[in-house]
Amino acid sequence: MFVDSHCHPDLPPLAGREEDMLAAMNDARVGHALAVSVNLERFPAILALAERHPHIFASVGVHPEETDVREAEAAELVRLAAHPRIVAIGETGLDYYWHKDAPEWQRNRFRTHIHAARDARLPLIIHCRNAFADTLAILREEGAREIGGVYHCFTGDVAYAEKVLDALDFYISFSGIVSFKNAAALKEVARMVPENRLLIETDAPYLAPVPHRGKPNQPAWVIHVAEELARLRQTSVEAIARASRENFFRLFARATPVAA
Ligand SMILES: [Zn+2]
Ligand SMILES: [Zn+2]
């Protein structure tokens, strides 16, 4: 059984096609998924999904790309995170790809989320794009190692992955990008991450893996990420499924697995 450790089922075209999405997961033996929050406005939809389905978990947070949304204060995040279906804080981090001016408000928002995660004793879901040094520096300054977390949709190189593992002891999650032909550096990372630190995800509806590249993604297709990791690491798909599932429930300790 597979776990999609990061998806956005509240976004179209997944939103409004819940039954199809769940049926496809079931057919592909994707037993669990984590629905990741990107702003407080849409958080109720994420939470409602996790309340309806025991195999779907949720997080709470405001994504670093989001503008024109309500800013989250640490106390509010902690209060929302007290709900038993919430298993993580995020996604949070830094994105200097969409915000090339590296704005101060992004770093402030990020620190707020780390404070909330520490108070709530929940792990962090980190989004990091073109902001590698600052993301690592802030996580270290704020003592994020004590609560743990995952770099979702990892796009760094081997040297950066080593820093994430050594300095933070965080998990590294691979998306469909690892299956893309031109992702040579990321394929190297996929070969070196310790088995007890890897996760798999779709980031659906974005980043559909090969052989569905370019289409709207869905949690069922996390199996193709597992297939690519198995190929790169010269192991079986079942071994990747087992390790990434164990890692998921170790990191997101509040999540209770549903029997298959
Ligand atoms: Zn992200
Ligand atoms: Zn995401």
Image: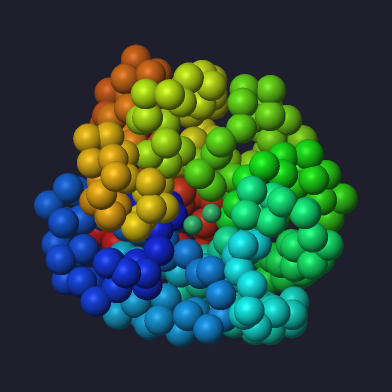
Q: Position of residue 109 (x, y in %)?
A: 75, 67
Residue depicted at x 32% and y 34%:
226
Q: Is residue 251 visible?
A: yes
Tell which of 88 and 217 is nearer to you: 217
Q: Is residue 123 visible?
A: no
Residue depicted at x 55% and y 39%:
154
- Which quadrant of the structure image shows residue 6? bottom left
- Which quadrant of the structure image shows residue 45? bottom left
- Which quadrant of the structure image shows residue 210? top left
- Looking at the rendering, the quadrant in which ligand 1 lies is bottom right
Tell me the quadrant of the picture where the C terminus can be found: bottom left
Q: Is residue 212 above or below residue 143?
A: above
- The reply, left or right, for residue 22 in relation to residue 27 is right
Residue depicted at x 17% and y 48%:
28
Q: Position of residue 208 (x, y in %)?
A: 32, 45
Residue extending farthest top? 234
Tell which of 157 and 121 is nearer to you: 157
- The reply, left or right, for residue 52 in relation to residue 197 is left
Residue extending farthest right? 141
Q: Position of residue 175 (x, y in %)?
A: 42, 41
Tell me the quadrant of the picture where the N terminus can be found: top left
Residue depicted at x 87% and y 50%:
141
Tell which of 182 and 126 is nearer to you: 182
Report how many numbered discs are placed on residues in the image.
0
Q: Position of residue 81 (x, y in %)?
A: 59, 76
